[in-house]
Image: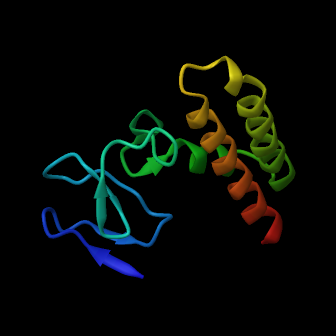
Amino acid sequence: MSNLCDSCSVEQDGFKTVSLCQNDKMQHWGGAEAAHDAVNSPSHYASGEIECIDAIKASMTPDAFTGYLKGNVQKYMWRYEKKVNPAEDLKKAQWYLARLIEEVEQ
């Protein structure tokens, strides 16, 4: 499913592609706009047109990358109870787990 932002004309492709609107600095989620999302697309992990996770994947073997994803799941599960917003860390663990599943299924 592809969507086009009426505000800035940035094309988005379903749930996986998330970027900042060029005009209003809101994030697009499959055509719907949402406030900054610290789980699925934290702005501090993007530089230009590449996300940090993609650069990390490109620098690793497939086995190393799945290990990296697994480690992040464990990290967020380990510390969520100590956080002010524990649900956010659980969602981050869920994000990394979903990405790990996607990588293993490929």
- 60 or 26, which lies in front? 26
Which quadrant of the rendered structure holds the N terminus? bottom left
Q: Residue furthest bottom?
A: 1
- 14 or 80, which lies in front? 80
Q: In this rendering, would 103 be left or right of 31?
A: right
Q: Where does the image place residue 36, in percent across and percent down from the top left?
A: 34, 42
Colour mapping: rainbow
Q: Where does the image place residue 96, in percent across and percent down from the top left?
A: 68, 48
Q: In this rendering, would 8 be left or right of 2?
A: left
Q: At x 76% / y 55%, what residue is drawn?
A: 100
The part of the image, by quadrant, that contains residue 4 is bottom left
Q: At x 29% / y 50%, what residue is drawn?
A: 20
Q: Where does the image place residue 25, in percent across and percent down from the top left?
A: 21, 45
Q: What count of labels does the image hold?
A: 0
Q: In this rendering, would 10 be left or right of 66?
A: left
Which quadrant of the rendered structure holds the C terminus? bottom right
Q: At x 59% / y 46%, what residue is drawn?
A: 53
- 78 or 50, which lies in front? 78
Q: At x 47% / y 66%, what residue is drawn?
A: 15
